[in-house]
Every structure is written in structure tokens, then in C-alpha cells.
Image (cartoon, rainbow, N blue to C red):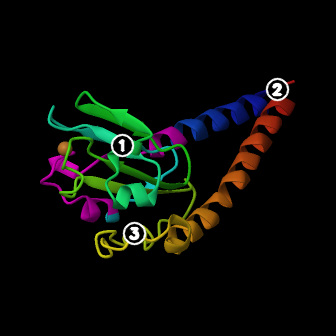
Amino acid sequence: MTISCRFIAVVIAVMFLRQALAAKHTVGGSQGWDESADFDTWASAQTFKVGDELEFKYSSLHSVAELPSESAFTNCDIGVASNSLTGGDSKVKLTKAGTRYFACGTSGHCGQGMKVKITTVAADATPTSPTGGSATPAAGGASPSPPTGGSTTPAATTQSTSAAAPRRRLLGIFAFVAFVALFV
Ligand SMILES: [Cu+2]
């Protein structure tokens, strides 16, 4: 009885710890979601992990459009946005590893650099420098490469991080089964 109670306490503590470790990233830092911010520099200094949250803070001049692909991001193709957020304070949860693309929905702002690429890694991944994410898309602006052939580095990142996710899920299931077994 005492042992299972202690185990439950540990499980609950771990769950709270995981919650506490989830970080909130205010996009653009102190400048927020604004043309004046340098989003490439900001993003490269961050480590985005599964469970973290992005917060966009902006004036009524701006909005947040999530773009579905690297090519849409490169070309500022706001018309194909998969999601649009308005209101000045938008939160986006990073639910899985991979790359997501955001741009301002206001005409012309994306072209002025108001866009950001977020590469999320598995929560238990070691925070290495995000070499894949720091490649500036502005460098090859004139020649939009096909999304499959051009982005070999992000694809490799996704593969290596997604391998960790099922292992974590298995651990979670194991913890749950152990919890139930002790409880009954
Ligand atoms: Cu804008």
C-alpha cells in the first residue's frame, strides 16, 4: 500500500515536471511579432521541443498565417495558409517534432522578412545546435527548389527525432501499466 502510494506520487511528480519543463517562446523576443524583429537570429538561439508553446504578440497591423510547406514559406504564398490567427496574442502548441512555417498575413509583410521557420525536436532530444533550421531561405531566393529534393537536412532531422517519439510513448505506456498493476 505504502509502496504504491509512493509510486503514484513519483508518477504525478514526473508528470508535473514534464509540464514545468515545457517552455513558452515569445516569437521575436522582446520585439514580438513585428517587422523590426530578426526572426532568423531569434529562432536559431532557441531550442523548440515537443510540448513547448509559441506565443505571437502583435499589433492589429499583423496576423499569423501558418504555411504548409517550405516552398510556400520561401515564396511567401500566404494564399495557401493552413491556419490563420488574429487578435494580437496567439498561442501555438508544438505537438510534434518537425518543421513549421509562419508568416504575417498582411500584404507585403512576409516579403519584408516577417516570417519564421520553427524546427521542433523531441522533448528528450539533446539540445544540439539546430544546423538544419539555421539555413537561411533568403540565400537562394530566386531559385525555389522542390520541397523534396531541396530540403535534405530538415528531412534528416525529422527522421532522427521521430525515432525518439515512439520510444517515449512506449515508456509512457509502460509507466501506465506499472501504475495500474500496482494499484489493483
Ligand atoms: Cu505584419
From the viewer's perspective, is 57 left or right of 129? left
Residue drawn at (26%, 45%) of the image: 104
Looking at the rendering, the stretch of residues picked out in magenta corresponds to 18-43
Find residue 79 and name its label.
1
Q: Which residue is label 3 attached to?
A: 144
Vertical relation: 147 (above or below) 90: below
Q: Quadrant of residue 152?
A: bottom right
- Please report whichever mark, 1 or 3, sits nearer to the chain's N-terminal start: 1
Residue drawn at (30%, 71%) of the image: 141
Q: Quadrant of residue 124?
A: bottom right
Q: Residue furthest left?
A: 36
- Please report whichever mark, 2 or 1, sits nearer to the chain's N-terminal start: 1
Vertical relation: 49 (above or below) 176: below
Which residue type does callout 2 highlight? Phe
Which residue type does callout 3 highlight? Pro
Q: Quarter for ligand 1?
A: top left
Foreground tag (3 vs 2): 3
Q: Residues within 10 Å of mark 3 (few under 14, many from 20)?
A: some
Q: Residues within 10 Å of mark 1 (few under 14, many from 20)?
A: few
Which residue type does callout 1 highlight? Gly
